[in-house]
Image (cartoon, rainbow, N blue to C red):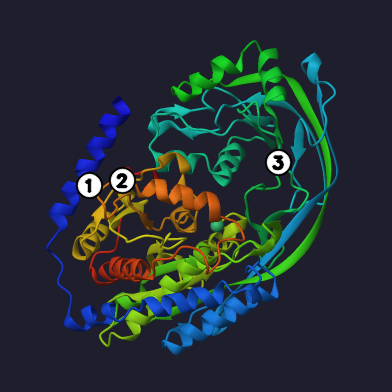
């Protein structure tokens, strides 16, 4: 009941916002005409090339990915976009490290009797360390719930518990009272590791709250990005040398450790959901030792710029990002092993190139400059964008906003939108203005539990303090049933992350045009606004 009320409230706020920002924008004839020139046929041609079998699914480090890089650079050159990568090139080198676990063992001393002999691959998995080829660690255990420390939001799993020198056990989740994007943020692996390190922990063990789940199979390797000095720059399984162990355990082992401390998961888990921390020092200690081996792979982000017209504001950038990589060649499905990624994310790249084309057709450029950033390694955990946001080829403070595009799902007419993350910043204004101009409704996120805000590249910019958003489809349908989510769910089951996501799938290229126009307009309005975007006062992301 409370949840429903909240949803209604936020829906009406959005409508209110749309109303109050509406009718404010006027576009020059030139801009209007340039927007009209976005071509569904061009979008189709771009997707057709990028999703062709000869690009073999655009796996980072493969020839197919290089073909995609060459192709988009050629497109951008043709639209008079200028290179803005390293040393005046189009590229930023991304050093991917694929780490494999060699010998690894984990044992629990002083533990519950039924867990003294635990099996690797069944009860637990130890992740390779991307920096240290050999690690051994022995430390007492502490259970720290969700591993969240947000005292300002009234929740701190670490309050009153000294975990210095201890290995912390964390189960992924967030209190029910947290909003969807705040939940997504605190549940993000990098954030969990950072908070554990800040509290002095020496290792993190992720514990499954699902009794039917198996521990992950990591035999195909775990990716990180190294910097040019050989340090780990981006990783979902490593934070610093201090946290030398990252492992996960299954529900049964988790439960027995908690039971030994006199608690029960059937009580603890609902308690955490209700917003009451249940942290406790455990009697058991862990010893682990592991060997890691590495395979280093070079991949590239593509970066271009369109210079703004204001002598001062042109030193600031509005970023349009999209990931260029996909899953490469993998397990065959119905006899096809090439994961073409036509929707995911050839369609997003086509959208960004269409935006560059609009700017090409505008003589009077916007006040701010536009940065086109096509990244690698999104499918490996937003790695390429994270590296770019941490080591941008323009000053980090010069990037005022990121408008990201990942799999717009152009499978039906675009009638309403959800702007993931926009509610955290002043970007909500430009979203409302652009949507209103295009005759599109703005809806709140229909699937907050999917944590979509942290599941693509916009989040990498957010982590560096840059307001960002990612426009997804809303639920509105032409027949008034407004159940587009059902259609998307059916589509997703058949195509998402499958070799079947190729050019023979379902497409609405007219919707692709509208989507590109809308994203252009949001970015254009930001680029024209004398005021730079700001986080909302007191917002969780405002602290950066
Ligand atoms: Zn994907």
Is residue 175 shown left or right of residue 481?
right
Give ligand 1's quarter of the image. Answer: bottom right
Residue 250 image-quadrant placement:
top right
Q: Which residue is mark 3?
A: 216
Q: Secondary structure at mark 3?
A: loop
Is residue 33 shown left or right of residue 134?
left
Q: Which residue is mark 2?
A: 444
Mark 1 or mark 2: name the one nearer the start of the chain. 1
Q: Secondary structure at mark 2?
A: loop
Q: Is mark 2 within 8 Å of ligand 1?
A: no
Mark 3 or mark 2: name the one nearer the start of the chain. 3
Q: Secondary structure at mark 1?
A: helix
The answer to whether residue 467 of the structure is visible from this angle is no
Residue at 14 percent across and 59 percent down: it is 22
Mark 3 or mark 1: name the one nearer the start of the chain. 1
Disc 1: CA contacts within 10 A as few (<14), some (14-19) or many (>=20): some
Along the line of sight, which residue is nearer the eye, 98 or 243? 98
Q: Position of residue 160 (x, y in %)?
A: 53, 22
Residue 543 circle label: none
Q: Which residue is mark 1?
A: 14
Q: Position of residue 273 (x, y in %)?
A: 47, 25
């Amino acid at each position: 009941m409370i949840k429903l009320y909240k949803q209604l409230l936020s829906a009406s706020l959005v409508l209110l916002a749309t109303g109050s920002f509406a009718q404010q924008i006027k576009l020059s004839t030139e801009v209007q005409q340039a927007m009209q020139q976005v071509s569904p046929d061009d979008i189709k041609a771009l997707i057709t090339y990028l999703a062709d079998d000869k690009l073999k699914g655009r796996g980072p480090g493969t020839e197919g990915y290089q073909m995609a890089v060459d192709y988009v650079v050629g497109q951008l050159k043709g639209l008079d976009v200028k290179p803005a990568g390293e040393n005046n090139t189009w590229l930023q080198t991304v050093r991917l490290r694929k780490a494999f676990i060699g010998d690894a063992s984990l044992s629990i001393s002083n533990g519950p009797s039924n867990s003294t002999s635990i099996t690797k691959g069944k009860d637990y998995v130890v992740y390779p360390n991307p920096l240290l080829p050999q690690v051994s660690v022995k430390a007492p255990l502490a259970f720290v719930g969700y591993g969240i420390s947000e005292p300002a939001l009234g929740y701190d799993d670490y309050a009153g518990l000294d975990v210095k020198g201890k290995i912390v056990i964390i189960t992924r989740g967030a209190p029910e009272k947290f909003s969807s994007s705040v939940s997504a943020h605190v549940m993000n692996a990098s954030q969990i590791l950072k908070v554990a390190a800040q509290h002095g922990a020496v290792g993190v063990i992720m514990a499954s709250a699902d009794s039917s789940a198996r521990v992950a199979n990591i035999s195909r390797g775990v990716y990180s990005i190294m910097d040019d000095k050989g340090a780990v720059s981006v990783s979902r399984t490593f934070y610093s040398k201090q946290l030398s162990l990252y492992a996960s355990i299954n529900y049964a082992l988790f439960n027995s450790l908690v039971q030994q401390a006199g608690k029960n998961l059937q009580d603890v888990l609902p308690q955490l959901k209700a917003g009451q921390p249940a942290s406790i020092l455990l009697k058991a200690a862990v010893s682990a030792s592991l060997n890691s081996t590495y395979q280093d792979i070079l991949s590239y982000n593509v970066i271009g710029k369109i210079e703004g017209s204001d002598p001062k504001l042109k030193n600031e950038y509005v970023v349009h990002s999209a990931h260029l990589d996909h899953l490469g060649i993998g397990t065959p499905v119905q006899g096809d092993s090439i994961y073409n990624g036509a929707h995911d994310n050839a369609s997003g790249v086509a959208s960004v190139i269409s935006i560059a084309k609009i700017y090409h057709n505008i003589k009077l450029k916007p006040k701010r400059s536009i940065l086109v950033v096509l990244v690698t390694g999104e499918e490996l955990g937003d790695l390429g964008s994270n590296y770019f946001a941490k080591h941008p080829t323009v000053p980090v403070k010069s990037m005022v906003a990121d408008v990201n595009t990942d799999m717009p799902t152009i499978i039906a007419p675009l009638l309403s939108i959800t702007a993931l993350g926009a509610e955290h910043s002043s970007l909500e204004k430009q979203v409302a203005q652009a949507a209103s101009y295009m005759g599109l409704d703005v809806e709140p996120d229909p699937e907050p539990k999917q944590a979509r805000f942290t599941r693509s590249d916009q989040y990498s910019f957010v982590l560096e303090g840059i307001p960002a958003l990612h426009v997804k489809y809303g639920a509105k349908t032409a027949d008034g049933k407004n159940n587009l989510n059902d259609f998307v769910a059916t589509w997703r089951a058949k195509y998402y992350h499958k070799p079947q996501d190729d050019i023979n799938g379902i497409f609405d290229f007219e919707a692709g045009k509208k989507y590109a126009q809308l994203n252009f307009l949001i970015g254009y309005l930001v680029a024209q606004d004398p005021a730079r975007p700001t986080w909302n006062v007191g917002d969780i992301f405002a602290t950066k």
